[in-house]
Amino acid sequence: MSKYIPSPSKWVSDQVELYESSGGIEGTTMNGLPVIIVTNRGWKTDSIRKTPLMKVMDGKKYILVASNGGASNHPSWYKNIKKEPKVQIQDGPTIYHMKANEVTDTITKNRLWEIMEKAFPPYRDYKNNTTRDIPVFLAE
Ligand code: F42
């Protein structure tokens, strides 16, 4: 069994702890909007990592947006999921085992951006304020 290493960012690890310890009843939102917890594997350490992300759906698929709060670099979990696409997604009390693939097709990505901006409007600012192409995964 690999070891779980909590995020060094306290607000992130606090949200994960509250979410999980309450069985997905508390800590499930940011700015009033729903959040999921994605469990992934560190590509370098092989440890277990847990990442809160906005809940954005394309039908039954989860859209994972590597926005990193609009930063100029990809979040660490981007590389982790590219290396090991198998993730666990906790959505409230429900846990799913899924596979997350990066969306590279422009037409699909543009369609997903419309959904993402409606679900979480700050994504639009993140996109406009960074030169990097924000990666997007579809988990199913
Ligand atoms: N981030 C998003 O990108 N999109 C969202 O929609 C989003 C929503 C959200 C909602 C609530 C909330 O609390 C946080 C939210 N975040 C969102 C922030 C998100 O949870 C992450 O904190 C953010 O995306 C940054 O991801 P990160 O993986 O870079 O996390 C940092 C804080 C972190 O944990 N860094 C570790 C460290 O030690 O510095 C690295 C952990 C890691 O994955 N290590 C790898 C390993 O092998 O173990 C090696 C990494 C390498 O390449 O060296």
Image (cartoon, helix red, strand yellow):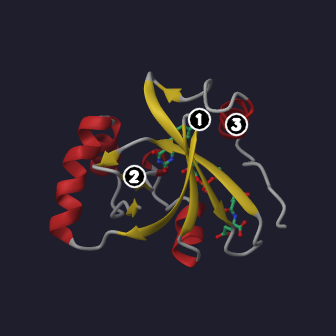
Position in image of residue 78 (x %, y %): 52, 65
Type of the residue with mark 1? Pro
Q: Which element type, helix, strand or loop, lies under badge 3?
A: helix
Quarter of the figure that contains the C terminus? bottom left
**Vertical order, 48 against 19 (above or below):** below
User: Is 18 displayed left or right of 126 in the figure?
Assistant: right
Could you tell which of marks 3 and 2 lies nearer the N-terminus? 3
Residue shown at 30% from the left, 41% from the top: 125
On residue 20, the disc is 3
Q: Is residue 38 above or below residue 48?
A: above
Q: Earlier in the sequence, mark 3 or mark 1?
A: 3
Pick whichever of labels 1 and 2 is earlier in the sequence: 2
The quarter of the picture where residue 52 lies is top right
Query: Do the residues under discs 3 and 1 have CB atoms within 8 angstroms?
Result: no
At a point 72% along the width and 48% down the height, the residue shown is: 7
Q: Which mark is residue 32?
A: none
Q: Residue at x 59, y 35 (%)?
A: 93
Disc 1, ligand 1: is the CB inside 8 Å? no
Q: In the image, residue 112 lies at what x, y percent?
A: 24, 54
- Taking 43 as reference, is 95 left or right? left
Q: Residue 45: x and y, percent?
A: 77, 72
Residue marked by disc 1: 93
Label count reads: 3
| Residue identified by numbered label 2 | 62
Residue sitting at x 24%, y 36% = 118
